[in-house]
């Protein structure tokens, strides 16, 4: 595994990092949850530092929040030799990393992902950014943190729904790159999964893919399996009343069922593989109702997907369990069928 | 010379670029001046494209203007295979380039610098960004355009004051890297300089430096000669009434006199070199009055310089004409003397 990712108790990994580096100043970015549940552990270890807290949630992943963070960095007079430490899930990691990468054209940052989702996905691979005009990760850059410090103990601070959401990316990693692991996880209930093992497995797969294609010119697109329709569903549900909103992994689980159907419809996977996938995902995530109006919005939203070229909407689809192909052009009519299949 | 920079009539260089590349969409970013004076030439050559116009001036180089540009890009449904063409001076190049580098984590852009300043400086080297909270280029990234298309004919669209401002960066390039060229230009009046020749000379020097140190870890800092105090003076004067504001090159000319004095005070250049520099710069730019209050603000502003480390303010100073040394730590008391020397 690439040395930039360390899976260990944060008290050890962070102490080690701090003692072997010299920074002019340190600023910690957290949300109100991680400030309460995770920051206290770091506070004991860190030398003099300042803390910026932003409200929790995807709705905060905006230019306006970045502006607040940049103001705090400026007020603290951070120079180019300062360090930013992001403690939180994907929102804090993506946004705090983006703020660091853009401040004075880039200062060092480390990611301390505290959710399963960010431990197995967002913290690895150098994609940073924020949402804009309702589009997910519409503004951003590629830039690597100095270190990603993963402490599985932080999972104990999470509600079950958060862990279930993160599990979706683990399932995705198995489906696109490791058929044997997919067989292993689908035989077990959610409650019986071994998170420590699965985090290391997911990080390894993601690193292998990203190392071969850091800027997503080709291969890296396979990590977007389930994400073309999944992101569109997630974005569509952003505007719903609080109780109906979806966690990222929940939307991706929906996207994976729809896109497995597309893989089947294109004769890339067989009926049995499709059945295995949908049974496991429905059993883990249940089914979400999608109205006729939402369907058209979801299809329209796929046009903003970053993998697209011109008017073509491009998908990453399964070739079989454990393999994935990218740049598959799919028409709106096919998407409509895939959504209908999901809704059954 | 690196092939990414082409010095030629824009009708030739742009036609060549467009015919040898395929883009899904093209968006042109201009300000109200370049829309009027430069865009018409490009419009004839370009295939179907859209145009975003922003008001001219450094005061527009803000996050709020970027937001407008990103909105326009989103409304045009630009995908990752789209092209941004920036037509203008440093403000448009830095800001339009930054917007392209961040949109969907980066799309292609080309720079069409239309001022002498941007032709000899801003368009080369990959520094992109915007001002923030009154600090110059406080937010930004490093990213290279596909091409820089320099057409010296655009200089005919400029007021003399603009050309004089751009000349300061040419003088800087000579002083830090080419003593013979410095001797050549200082023997001639401003009106007699050969711009076509000097543009090519400056681009070559800047490219050589940037290629050796693209992210300014070391050597590239020499390009900041005159800029530590120069930027601080420029920033200080941003808040003055319109008639007293300084063009970038005018502020850098002031900074070069002050920093040549510092080079002399540190025994890095001799008295004759200092006299030559100040005589030529005063003859070309005159002297600007700086109040006692402004002096303290200027010194405080140098603390935000990107070259600093911790509380140390670091300068790039001349070793002799044609050579420059970086990371020279200078105290506030020395700066005060340098400003006093300038004011005579």
Image (cartoon, coloured by chain):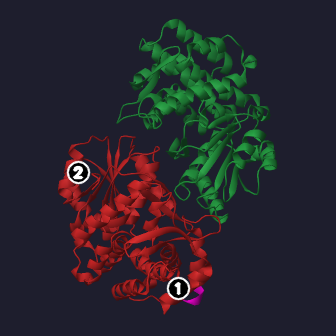
Chain colours: A green, B red
Locate residue A275: give its quadrant.
top right
x then y, percent, for residue A35: 77, 47
Given residues B184 and B282, the one toward you in this image is B184
Q: Which residues are magenta?
A: B289-293
* Residue lying farthest to the bottom in this orientation: B344
Q: How many labels, in total?
A: 2
> Chain for mark 2?
B
Q: Horizontally, is A67 left or right of B25 in the view?
A: right
Tell me the residue at 56%/53% (across/down).
Answer: A63
**Does dot 2 land on a helix, a strand or a loop?**
loop
Task: Provide residue B211's location: percent of width, then percent of height.
Answer: 38, 54
Q: Which residue is mark 1?
A: B339
Callout 1: residue from which chain? B
> What is the C-alpha distance between the residues marked 2 and 1?
49 Å
Residue at the image point whose x is 75% and y is 19% from the top: A191
Quadrant of the rendered structure where residue B36 is?
bottom left
Residue at disc 1, secondary structure: helix
Pointer 2: what residue?
A: B46
B272 lies above or below A134: below
The answer to which of marks 2 and 1 sits earlier in the sequence is: 2
The quadrant of the image that shows the C terminus of chain A is: top right
Across and down, in percent, residue B176 comes to: 39, 71
Quadrant of the snapshot with the N terminus of chain A: top right
Residue A100 visible in image: yes
Foreground mark, 2 or 1? 1
Q: Main secondary structure of the magenta part?
A: loop
In terms of depth relative to the viewer, which is nearer, A124 or B22? A124
Q: Residues within 10 Å of mark 2 (few under 14, many from 20)?
A: some
């Amino acid at each position: 595994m690439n040395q930039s990712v360390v899976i260990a108790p944060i008290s050890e990994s962070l102490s080690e990092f701090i003692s072997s580096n010299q920074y002019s100043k340190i600023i910690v970015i957290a949300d109100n949850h991680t400030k309460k549940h995770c920051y206290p552990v770091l506070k004991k270890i860190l030398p003099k530092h300042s803390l910026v807290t932003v409200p929790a949630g995807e709705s905060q992943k905006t230019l306006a929040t970045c502006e607040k963070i940049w103001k705090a960095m400026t007020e603290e007079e951070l120079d180019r030799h300062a360090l930013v430490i992001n403690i939180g899930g994907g929102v804090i990691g993506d946004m705090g990393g983006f703020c660091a990468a853009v401040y004075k054209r880039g200062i060092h940052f480390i990611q301390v992902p505290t959710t399963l989702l960010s431990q197995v996905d967002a913290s690895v691979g150098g994609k940073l950014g924020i949402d804009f005009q309702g589009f997910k990760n519409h503004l951003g850059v590629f830039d690597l943190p100095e270190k990603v410090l993963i402490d599985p103990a932080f999972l104990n601070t999470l509600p079950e729904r958060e862990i279930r959401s993160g599990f979706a990316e683990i399932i995705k990693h198995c489906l696109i790159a490791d058929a044997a692991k997919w067989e292993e996880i689908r035989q077990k209930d959610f409650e019986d999964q071994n998170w420590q093992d699965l985090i290391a497995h997911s990080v390894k797969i993601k690193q292998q893919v990203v190392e071969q294609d850091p800027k997503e010119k080709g291969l890296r697109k396979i990590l977007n399996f389930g994400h073309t329709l999944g992101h569109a569903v997630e974005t569509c549900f952003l505007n719903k009343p609080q109780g109906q909103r979806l966690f990222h992994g929940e939307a991706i689980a929906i996207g994976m069922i729809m896109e497995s159907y597309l893989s089947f419809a294109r004769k890339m996977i067989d009926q049995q593989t499709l059945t295995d996938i949908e049974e496991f995902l429905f059993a883990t995530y249940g089914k979400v109702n999608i109205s006729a109006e939402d369907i058209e919005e979801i299809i329209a939203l796929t046009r903003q997907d970053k993998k697209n070229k011109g008017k073509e909407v491009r998908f990453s689809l399964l070739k079989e369990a454990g393999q994935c192909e990218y740049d598959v052009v799919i028409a709106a009519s096919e998407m409509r069928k895939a959504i209908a299949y999901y809704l059954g």
